[in-house]
């Protein structure tokens, strides 16, 4: 008898490949980007340097960082074609639909004229340039999405501001305080990469077919849209809005648990002792609470965390502090997941390059549990069917 294979639902515990991009060090419970603890990167580096690290494996020299920033500034403006495509997306659609559409348009423009699909994959140099282009273009896409939903015009980028400061400038049309820029920069670094998560694995599966980088990123965006992945930071703010005040936490949580409601922002498949990114993001949130004088936000955050951990023993993940932090900065709740895209595109494209460097088509097996073989009444097999059946019998 053939032994029934063990099914790992959700691929839990399955090691699908090797990667040098990131890992969670179980000894220190630290997320490492190319070996560097992410909390150290968030405390010391601009997001551009972390993007360089993910793509190249090492932090940039001053000259290398200057060159990356030159290229990033060159690709900041929102092109007319991309803006027109975003404008075609209904205002009632989710902003992730805008981002997905915009990346498709950027890809179509870049790949136009490549001819056969066999030519669309590109060289290592081509894909690095495309990665940098997406990294540079996404802030304008995300910023315009929020502004158009508010009935506002697009804001042109500024060459005298770094990535994080310019992102905020294009979103709000005014310079942000250094405290806000620093908190936002740290959040982008924390969201940049996280090994074989659902969206990254989606990108690697698509890449393994030798499809192009833009198609892989579009697929990753679609995976990130789901509330069990990137959409969780939006859900945290909806929960905060429902509760309203720290004094309401006990009653709200009692009802939520009684109805077996999933509380977003808590728990993580990888971390069992708490998400290692949370302390860094919580420190950024605390600075924003002080800057905006919003102790009510901190009180609600602390009350819900304390009660949920006490009752369930499940700790917050990165989405829990990032949601209220983005809200304090001024981002609409619907913009939270597009911000995730703008950060994670660096990790996605690093994994796309890694997949291509040692590619094998990702094609798992499945265990069939449907009806046994059956036939259409009155069907008479033709010669081709008989030959195929005979060959199958010969092969055992």
Image (cartoon, grey):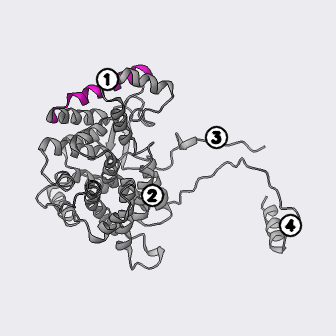
The residue that disc 2 covers is 219
- Counting from the top left corner in percent of width and height, residue 197 is at 43, 46
Q: Which circle, 1 or 2, is nearer the viewer?
A: 1
Q: Classify 10 Å Cα crowding around label 3: few (below 14), some (14-19), many (20 and above).
A: few
Along the polypeptide, which appears first: circle 1 or circle 2? 2
When asked about the image quadrant of residue 325, the answer is: top left
Towards the viewer: 315 or 41: 315
Q: Classify 10 Å Cα crowding around label 4: few (below 14), some (14-19), many (20 and above).
A: few
The residue that disc 3 covers is 6
- Counting from the top left corner in percent of width and height, residue 368 is at 70, 49
For label 4, the SS is loop
The residue that disc 4 covers is 379
Along the polypeptide, which appears first: circle 1 or circle 3? 3
Along the polypeptide, which appears first: circle 4 or circle 3? 3
The residue that disc 1 covers is 303
- Counting from the top left corner in percent of width and height, residue 356 is at 43, 62
For label 2, the SS is helix
């Amino acid at each position: 008898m053939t032994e029934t294979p063990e099914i790992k639902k959700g691929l839990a515990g399955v090691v699908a490949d090797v990667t040098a991009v990131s890992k969670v060090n179980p000894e220190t419970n630290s997320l490492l980007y190319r070996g560097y603890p992410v909390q150290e990167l968030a405390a010391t580096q601009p997001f551009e340097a972390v993007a360089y690290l993910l793509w190249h494996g090492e932090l940039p020299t001053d000259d290398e960082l200057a060159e990356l920033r030159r290229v990033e500034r060159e690709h900041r403006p929102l092109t007319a074609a991309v803006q027109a495509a975003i404008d075609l997306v209904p205002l009632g659609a989710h902003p992730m639909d805008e981002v997905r559409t915009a990346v498709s348009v950027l890809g179509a423009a870049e790949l136009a004229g490549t001819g056969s699909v066999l030519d669309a994959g590109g060289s290592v140099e081509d894909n690095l340039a495309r990665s940098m282009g997406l990294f540079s273009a996404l802030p304008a896409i995300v910023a315009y999405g929020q502004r158009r939903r508010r009935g506002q015009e697009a804001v042109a980028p500024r060459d005298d501001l770094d990535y994080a400061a310019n992102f905020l400038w294009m979103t709000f049309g005014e310079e942000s305080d250094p405290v806000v820029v620093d908190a936002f920069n740290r959040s982008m670094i924390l969201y940049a990469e996280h090994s074989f998560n659902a969206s990254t694995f989606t990108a690697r599966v698509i890449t393994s077919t030798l499809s192009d980088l833009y198609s892989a990123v579009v697929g990753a965006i679609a995976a990130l849209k789901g509330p069990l992945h990137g959409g969780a930071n939006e859900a945290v703010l909806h929960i905060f809005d429902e509760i309203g005040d720290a004094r309401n936490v006990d009653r709200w949580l009692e009802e939520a648990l009684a109805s077996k409601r999933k509380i977003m922002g808590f728990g993580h498949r990888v971390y069992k002792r708490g998400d290692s990114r949370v302390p860094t993001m919580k420190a950024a949130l605390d600075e924003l609470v002080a800057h905006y004088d919003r102790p009510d936000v901190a009180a609600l955050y602390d009350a819900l965390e304390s009660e949920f951990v006490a009752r369930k023993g499940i700790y917050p993940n990165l989405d829990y502090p990032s949601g209220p932090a983005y809200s304090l900065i001024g981002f609409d709740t619907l913009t939270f997941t597009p911000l995730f895209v703008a950060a994670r595109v660096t990790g996605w494209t690093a994994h796309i390059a890694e997949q291509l460097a040692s590619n094998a088509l990702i094609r798992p097996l499945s265990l069939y549990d449907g009806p046994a073989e059956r036939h259409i009444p009155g069907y008479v097999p033709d010669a081709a069917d008989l030959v195929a059946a005979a060959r199958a019998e010969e092969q055992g």
